[in-house]
Image (cartoon, coloured by chain):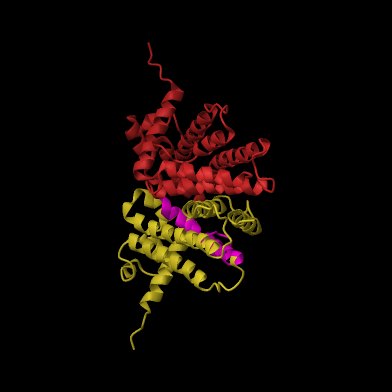
Chain colours: A red, B yellow
Amino acid sequence: MPKIVDHDKQRQLVAEAAIRVIRRSGLEQATVRNVAVEAGLSVGSMRHYFSTQAELFAFCMTLFRERIERRIEMMSFSGPVLLEVRNLILQFIPVDEERKTEMEVWLSFNAKALIHPELRLLSQEMHDGLYKASSIVIETLRQHKLARPDLDPEIETEKLYALIDGLALHQIMQPGRLSSERIEHMIDEHLRMLCAR
Amino acid sequence: MPKIVDHDKQRQLVAEAAIRVIRRSGLEQATVRNVAVEAGLSVGSMRHYFSTQAELFAFCMTLFRERIERRIEMMSFSGPVLLEVRNLILQFIPVDEERKTEMEVWLSFNAKALIHPELRLLSQEMHDGLYKASSIVIETLRQHKLARPDLDPEIETEKLYALIDGLALHQIMQPGRLSSERIEHMIDEHLRMLCAR
């Protein structure tokens, strides 16, 4: 009987190997050859899973997006509104190892997308997801009549979007400078400022 | 008479050539050879100015920091407080070509510093400058009794620091999405929220 290889599962294993290489040595080192070695595959067999490096990177980014989406889907949204929106925001900030890996690879990817226009669309999609989450936070506060009446929803969505990406960037560049509790407190303070007294 | 070459000026010209290469093709392409070609120098003569690539990058980052410091020194700080602190914040956001170049190279540099610990210190110094500026903004608002009395200065410094870096990141990754006027309006709104009514 021929060996049956689950193609999708194998692609996922290759992507995870690529992510490990990127974290360890940077995006430039995530060549087909190096990723094959890391995944324990022959270079030739890599072709079955990804025909180009760009395709492999695209798959990694999609993997991250799906993980974030899954974390958000698992949220119950049944608790107090402020707690729920806070949790939504925290899905995008590297407060644990999983999120830290995502952000590190994502930052390298962003820098690469600057000079490779074909990667821009993917980078754009990730940004769109975060923008949408920021927009949901502001809209939720408004719908529950928690937001300050003079709050400009578009401006506050943009500000929250920038605040989250900035915090994530700082957590990656200066790990350990801010504790997870401190970051949660910052988010709470920001939400408090958005709300009417 | 022997040709007199201004060593410091020449180093600056080499660094500017390096910055052009980085913007065009990414940090990985800013090899000694490529930078020499861009600067119109022989590879051999590069040794007189920078002995390693790391030294060249360090010089570029110092150049950026000096430029920002010079822009801040040129500020009069004699006008209305809110306008002055707004201008201070805008020194760090790519609202014109000069700041755009700085941020693009800075972003690539950040990604590289993730996997090259010897570059971390420089990356850290740039971050420290922005943190200090954020702290000056919050302290100025407090000294002039403009800040909300319940404002936590440390938390708001951290938030402003993250907001500025996030905005700068978005301007670089998604150029043209937000106009300079829009960004200025966001900064104004943020300052307004920090101030007592």
Q: Nearer the viewer, residue B145 or B69?
A: B145
Tell me, yes or no, if residue A67 can be seen here.
yes
Q: Nearer the viewer, residue A138 or B64?
A: A138
What range is drawn magenta here? B82-111
Residue lying at the far bottom of the rendered structure: B1
Provide residue B114's location: percent of width, then percent of height: 38, 49
Q: Is residue A172 left or right of residue A88?
A: left
Tell me, yes or no, if residue A48 can be seen here.
no
Against B18, is A163 above or below? above
* Residue that appears at 53% across and 28% down: A75
Q: Report which quarter residue A194 is drawn in.
A: top right
Against B130, is A73 above or below? above
Against B83, is A27 above or below? above
Provide residue A13's location: percent of width, then percent of height: 40, 28
Q: How many marks?
A: 0
Dividing the image into 4 quarters, which one contains the C terminus of chain A?
top right
| Residue B129 belongs to magenta span | no
Q: Report which quarter residue B62 is drawn in.
A: bottom left
* Residue that appears at 38% across and 75% down: B8
Dividing the image into 4 quarters, which one contains the N terminus of chain A?
top left
Q: Is residue A28 left or right of residue A133?
A: left
Q: Is residue A185 left or right of residue A136?
A: left
Is the stretch drawn in magenta largely helix, strand or loop? helix
Q: Is residue A123 left or right of residue A34?
A: right
Provide residue B78's location: percent of width, then percent of height: 58, 74
